[in-house]
Amino acid sequence: MPLRPDQLTDPMLRQASATTLAHYEEVAEAFRDNTLDHDVSQNIAALLRHVRTAAPYRLLDFGCGPGRDLRTLTALGHLATGLDGCQRFVAMARASSGCDVWLQNFLELDLPGDHFDGIFANAVLFHIPSQNILQVLRQLHASLRSNGVLFCSNPRGQDEEGWNGDRYAVYYRWETWQRIMNEAGFTELEHYYRPDGLPREQQPWLASVWRRS
């Protein structure tokens, strides 16, 4: 269905969050095993090549899941922190990466200001209802240092929003996502579609990189 800004009541927003998190709590081990070998090196490289400060970078893996990408970022020599709303993911990520991992609901974030050189939001922001996405993006913006970089990757669509099984999701068009990011105070650095090397109709993921304006 089309985007429906300001249509969800507070109880509906809480339900969207709670039900989506409950889904991931239930499938945590299967999700970890099924995504362990996913190659997101293109996405990690897209984030890192735009960071302007001297390494090691201070990075936030926003929606870190079981910790796969935290391990990669740490192995590359950076100072990575994870954040997720799923308790089982947080426990897995802490155990497997050795990183500091924060348990926070995306709709109730408490992030340090002017702190991170880069934020890696891979396959996560599409779970945030459209009426809350600007608030979350502005919190991420404030948590970045001057000229900090945000990477995000979301399944694309025609601005449909609603339930996909037990998960709440929003599938943005590029033009819509670009407008939202600009409104949140970000300047585009690049965008591309994934998986790489396939016809556009076989590339369901939209990746984009942004600098804090």
Image (tube, rainbow, N blue to C red):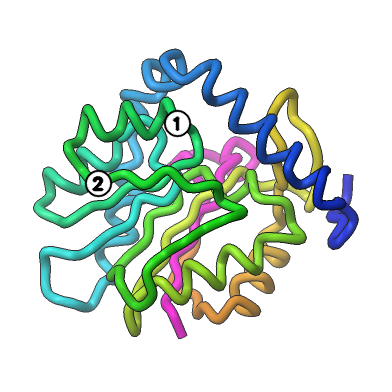
Q: Which mark is residue 87?
A: 1
The three-letter amino acid code for the residue at tag 1 is Gln
Looking at this view, is 68 or 100 the one in front? 100
State the image coordinates of residue 58 (x, y, percent, origin top left). 22, 64
Q: What residue range appears in magenta?
A: 192-213
Q: Nearer the viewer, residue 110 or 54?
A: 110
Q: In which quarter of the image is residue 56?
A: bottom left
Residue found 27% across the figure and 59% down from its top: 59
Residue positioned 61% across, 23% down in the render? 23
Q: How far apart are marks 2 and 1 (CA)?
A: 14 Å
Residue 100: numbered disc: 2
Q: Position of residue 166 (x, y in %)?
A: 71, 25
Q: Does the magenta stretch include residue 201?
A: yes
Q: How crowded is mark 1: few (under 14 residues within 10 Å), some or many (20 or more)?
A: some
Rendered view: 108 above or below 135: above
Residue at the location (30% across, 33% down)? 93
Amino acid beneath label 2: Asp
Decide whether residue 174 is among the magenta residues.
no
